[in-house]
Image (cartoon, grey):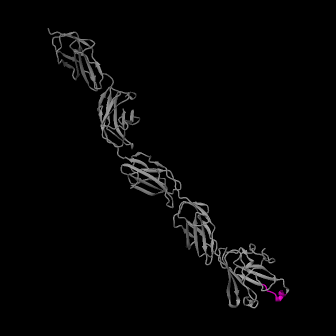
Amino acid sequence: GENVGVYIYRDSDNNWILIENLTGGESTISYVISSFDIENYLEGGENLKIMYEDFGSDDTQDNLYLDLCILQMNRLDNSEVLIQVSTSSDNLHWGENLGPDGTPGTYFTSSPASLENIPENRYIRYIVYFRSENEWLSGENGPKVFEVVIYARPCVGEPLLSSPENGSTIRDNTPLFQWAPAEDAVEYRILVDNDPDFSSPLYSKAEIGENRHECENALPDGTYYWKVVAVGLENERESQVWCFTLSTRLGIPTLRLPENGSYLDDNTPRFEWENAENADWYQLQISSSPDFRSPIYDNSNVAENSCEIENALPEGRWYWRVRGRDNWNNLGEWSEVREFVVDVSPPARLSLLSPSDGSFTNNSTPTFSWSGGSDANFLSYCLQVDNNDNFDDGVFYDNDNLFAGQWSTIKSYKLPQENALNLDGWWYWRVGARDRAGHVRWSEKWKLLLDRSPPSAPSNLLPENCSFENSKRPTFRWSGVEDPSGVTYRLQISTSSTFSTLVYDKAGIAGTSHTLENDLPDNVYYWRVVVRDGAGNENASETLRFTVDTL
């Protein structure tokens, strides 16, 4: 299947004469030299030179075709041709004449014949022996032994492929192809195809002056075959065919932090995600809109699976996403889009309403009331009640989830019975508003005195028991009572000793005497004084009787 030119040398005019071109398959060529002209062809009067010039890709001749070397006499005689081969590295020093088994005692007699036992070398010389059945052609009158010298033009060496390695998987869609330099090559040609027959190469490049080439066009993912053709001065030689798989697919990162819908009190948050398959770098985008038309942050050179931004984000709602990138700038798909809210400002401070600061109560489950501003990210109210004004070391009552999501101007909350205050004395309380980012801004603290002990009972002084009064508006007197929370008195008068019905009832008397404000009809009456302290505890005096008689 190679192109071979067959020449014969004419010594008389120092010229190689083309006999015929062989372009493939077996064929027989003839070149007739008359006996009168033979001397013009013999070099030194002995050697007949025949040369073939090979334009194929082989640097060694694998088979010897005797057809190329048959000498035919212009006579009707049978003859045969025997051939031996010798080799040389410099065309000056030749080895022994050898037959097909590599020894001098055998001859090539048929075509084709293998040269596998002949030592490899740069030059090959064919020795042709002609024999005839006619005796008169034998001896000195017969044909001489002629040497047929084959001058081999240099054949280019085979390029040995290096990378991408055979059967490998790569991610560079413009791969760098490399191979070992081929002997006597002046340039190279590369072919890349998705079919090993290279019938329609997807990529080819000729006139490559070095033993490497970077693909100029991006290849799509798939399996490819490639080979290199070494081009010499007069022939070419192909490399082996290697294959590789191009896969530029990158995994999709799984987002970790911040969690979707989270509220952050950090305006330089840390973003974290799971590693994506085949990703060498990551691109992080943060935007105020879910379509990322104008990202406020866009970093495509994140080397780890986390990133903490340096510039503070303004308060508000933000969206973020991540995708992978490899060292060849192949980009993966975007992750899901997550949102978060930056909120670094605590809610407005609340104002306490009741119980008033420093007040007294005998109610161990008091109702607390407050009012205050608003917060767009309000989550709940927080109430703390403790007998330590520092609210540390185990707060007696600590609830951070009151009225969750129910912001209003005024709120009231009654302490549950199971959390009733358990000791008389001073208690401290405060209220805070908590937002979704975890901020709590506390109100000022107020104190409340729990006093469940009644004051001492007062003693009735006037009117004395069983006395008679001639005034319809008598004056009543009693002894005073001391209490830290302060006291007031209540005067009660009834016609019944059980005070089932009252004819006079006056509360809030600050002093220890009181003159009736309206007339009492003449009758028998009972009276008593009820003392009340600042916490609401009461104690009554004994009951005395008197008679109003104005007649």
Question: Quarter of the image holding residue 181?
Answer: bottom right
Residue 142 painted magenta: yes
Q: Can residue 188 be seen?
A: yes
Q: Nearer the viewer, residue 395 or 236?
A: 236
Q: Quadrant of the N terminus?
A: bottom right
202 is higher (above) or lower (below) than 421: below
Residue most extreme to the front:
76
> With 281 as the anchor, is 226 left or right in this view?
right
Residue 456 in the image: state x and y as whole percent: 29, 20
Q: Nearer the viewer, residue 280 or 334?
A: 334
Please, which residue is most extreme toward the left here?
Answer: 551
- Residue 422: percent from left, percent from top: 38, 27
- 343 sits to left or right of 142: left
Provide residue 281's location: percent of width, then percent of height: 49, 57
Residue that appears at 43% across and 51% down: 320
Q: Quadrant of residue 356?
A: top left
| Residue 271 in the image: above or below residue 477 | below
Horizontal arrangement in the rendering, residue 240 relative to residue 426 (left or right)? right
Please say whether residue 165 is one of the residues in the magenta stretch: no
Q: x%, y% of residue 164? A: 58, 64
Residue 180 visible? The answer is no
| Rendered-image quadrant of the C terminus | top left
- Toward the right, the furthest residue is 135
- Residue segment shown in magenta: 136-145
Residue found farthest to the top: 551
